[in-house]
Image: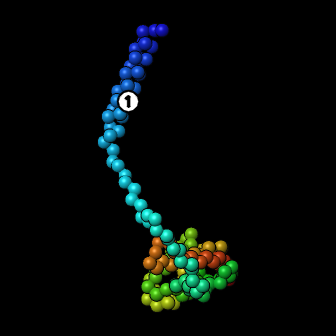
Amino acid sequence: MNRETGIAVIFGIGLGALVGIIIFLNVGTGTVTKVIPVAKNEKVQIEKPSSKVIEKEGILKLKTPEDKIVVDAKEITVSGSTTPKSLIIIQSPVSRVILKNDKEEFKSSFPLAVGENNITVSTYKDSNTPQEKSVSVYYIPTVE
């Protein structure tokens, strides 16, 4: 064994022992987590869900445009209904319109690009999870 190899082995063993001692001394300084039983020797009753149908409030409904419609105008009207005071985002790869509705109904002009336009309408009300509807609109300009 070379002299350098022996020094490296002794240095490695010494450093490993030092790290072990530090870890051993810090083991007792950690925090202790206490587990407190919530229901000790008590019977838990689980209520069965009621048979009532709960209607989801604020369902997004699109009136216009229809899905897979072909138009020859540069703009289209996006309209529908959702919960009042919702944030409404109408977006496609080329444009985005953001509005807040005061009533249940909403209506906005939306620009189109030539060809296929995948338009997504998202509404946000009291949560971070939006309600979304998507439609495809095809804009084919007329040749004059």
The picture places residue 88, in percent across and down from the top left corner, at 49, 80
Residue drawn at x 46%, y 82% is 86
Q: How is the image coloured?
A: rainbow
Estimate the x, y position of residue 116 in percent, counting from the top left: 65, 73
Q: Is residue 137 left or right of residue 4?
A: right
Q: Nearer the viewer, residue 6 or 14?
A: 14
Left or right: residue 96 versus residue 63 is left
In this orientation, does residue 22 appear?
yes
Image quadrant in which the C terminus is located? bottom right
Q: At which x and y percent is residue 80?
A: 56, 87
Residue furthest front in the image: 41
Q: In front here: 142 or 120?
A: 120
Q: How many marks?
A: 1
Residue at image x 36%, y 34%?
23
- Where residue 54 sits: x, y (%)? 56, 85
Other residues around mark 1 within 10 Å, as few (<14) / some (14–19) / many (≥20): few
Relative height, residue 144 to residue 93 (above, below): below
Q: Is residue 52 above or below residue 97?
A: below
The residue lying at 44 percent from left, 66 percent from top is: 39
Q: Regarding mark 1 in the picture, which secondary structure is present there?
A: helix
Image quadrant of residue 18? top left
Displayed quadrant of residue 140: bottom right
At 35% across and 33% down in the image, what residue appears? 24
- Residue holding disc 1: 20
Q: Give the residue type that dot 1 points to.
A: Gly
* 24 sits left or right of 113 in the view: left
Can residue 61 be seen here? The reply is no
Frontmost residue, 71 versus 85 = 85
